[in-house]
Image (cartoon, rainbow, N blue to C red):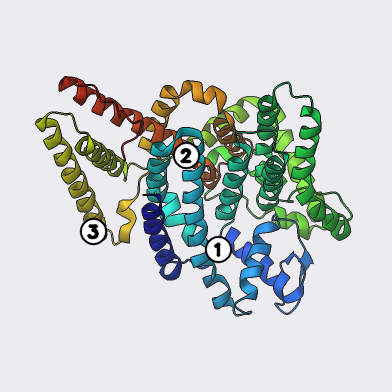
Amino acid sequence: RRTLILTAVCIVHLVLGFFKYDEPRRDAAEYHALARNVLVHSTFALDAEDPTQPGSPSARRMPLYPLFLTLLYTATGNSDEDSYLVVGPVQGVLMVCIVALIMAVGRRLFGDGPALVAGLLAGLYQPYLFYLPTQLLSETLYMVLLLLSLYSLTCTDPHRTGVLASGFGLLGLLVLTRAHGVSVLPVALLWTWKKLGRAPDRSRIMVLAFLCASLPLAPWCVRNVLAFGDFIPFSTNGGWNFYLGHNEDYQKAPELGAGTDYAIFDRLLEEGLTEPQADRELYRRGFTFAFAHPGETCINILRKAAVVFSVTTLQTWNLLCLIAVLAGIRLLKTKWILVRHRVLGAAAVVLGLSFWGAKIAAVMLTQQRGLAGAGVSFGLLGLASLLGLAVSFRSVRNHWLLPGVYLSQLAASLVYIPIVRIRWTVDFVVILYAAVGICAFISWLVSHAEKTAGTTSNENESHPL
């Protein structure tokens, strides 16, 4: 079953990667430019007026994803078209790895059934299905590293220092991909501290974990000292992001649309400031506004939350159809139930697939959006995840790492700017708990059907497949 799910996801993402890949813009264009400068001029630089020149050193982006692109471009030469188009299929492969890792983490924490349902949901989740695989963005690599580190950190034996060291080393690479990943590190350290209990070697293991997380950042810090004469542990666009979320004009455009002063960082550079100086200046302006207007700052946080959790209801019916199909399959596989319940199960499968197929056909015919009508959206998944949290409360108390990671990344969006893509990178947590909730609901349906038939099943599984 896992192989079937991953095969289907792989086919879809590879097709999208080959035939629906967008030309790099904004963030993607900077990643592309950095990667090509590393490839052609062997320097991590931006803003070269003459493409034959390397440009000035830059730290506006964390380096791991551009270096990852450089490795891909090396295999395809220096043609602009060939360079970025090769990324499409690779992004598709990364998304398949993400689905596989979501299933692996789900199986380790919640069992086979929720893991399978989580794989289905992740494969159909709209941002994972149609946006991230078709963009030259670092979120895919970020999610792979995050899920790998979570899989290592949730190892049943916390004293396996090799596994623990690899998990924290992956967290270091995570920060080297996107700077907001640093907010995951305190959560992971606290998780490990609690998990070790009163072990006599706890302090030594914690020091090892911190060193493993810090080690991947060391070359980046050394490079920045040599390039700028300044200590820069992360990127220099942190102040820019912080200022955009804390200024007098933010309330006019909470979604950072028209009216947002995106060019302020470049103007500071034109005035003669270096990137680190411009970064600190924008932090200073942002904090000055926040301390001078605490009430408006708090209201802006609510505005950011509204942007981060903005969802569409386009795919709400798709998730209901999927639940109906899974429930129907589970009823059909249950032996000791009444005939009418078996008929209801068959009807649920047929109607669920029929409505789902009709929805896809309608979207394809009326809106020409391809298979966009097949995905599921965040809204109903969020409600299902609340059910999953409720039915697995004891598990949450023992495995609070996932909710902690989710909240840490949301905090980064609320403190800086409301980038929905940051929430997407941790929406797999919602997907996992939604799978737990869906499985619990279907198990309740099957149990009710068995009780109605006057029987008690000895094989009352906790999942629908």
At horizontal 35% and vertical 33% (from top left) the residue drawn is 439
Q: Quadrant location of the C terminus?
A: top left
Q: Which residue is mark 2?
A: 107
**Is there CB contact under 8 Å for labels 1 and 3?**
no
Comparing 109 with 48, the one in front is 109
Comparing 199 with 102, the one in front is 199
Numbered-mark total? 3
Q: Amino acid at mark 1?
A: Arg
Q: From mark 2 to mark 3, how far is it between C-alphas?
A: 39 Å
At horizontal 51% and vertical 47% (from top left) the residue drawn is 101
User: Tag 2's secondary structure?
Assistant: helix
x and y percent of residue 290 in the render?
68, 31
Residue 154, visible in the rendered structure: yes
Q: Is residue 285 left or right of residue 157?
A: right
Q: Is residue 228 left or right of residue 454?
A: right
Q: From mark 1 to mark 3, how far is it between C-alphas?
A: 28 Å
User: Tag 3's secondary structure?
Assistant: helix
Comparing 149 with 29, the one in front is 149
x and y percent of residue 304 in the render?
54, 36
Q: Amino acid at mark 2?
A: Arg
Residue 369, visible in the rendered structure: no
At horizontal 85% and vertical 60% (from top left) the residue drawn is 227
Q: Which residue is mark 1?
A: 25
User: Tag 1's secondary structure?
Assistant: loop
Quadrant for residue 319, please give it: top left
Q: Which residue is mark 3?
A: 366
Q: Which mark is residue 359?
A: none
Q: Is residue 253 left or right of residue 232?
A: left
Q: Amino acid at mark 3?
A: Thr
Q: Is residue 412 left or right of residue 285?
A: left
Vertical placement of 46 versus 157: above or below? below
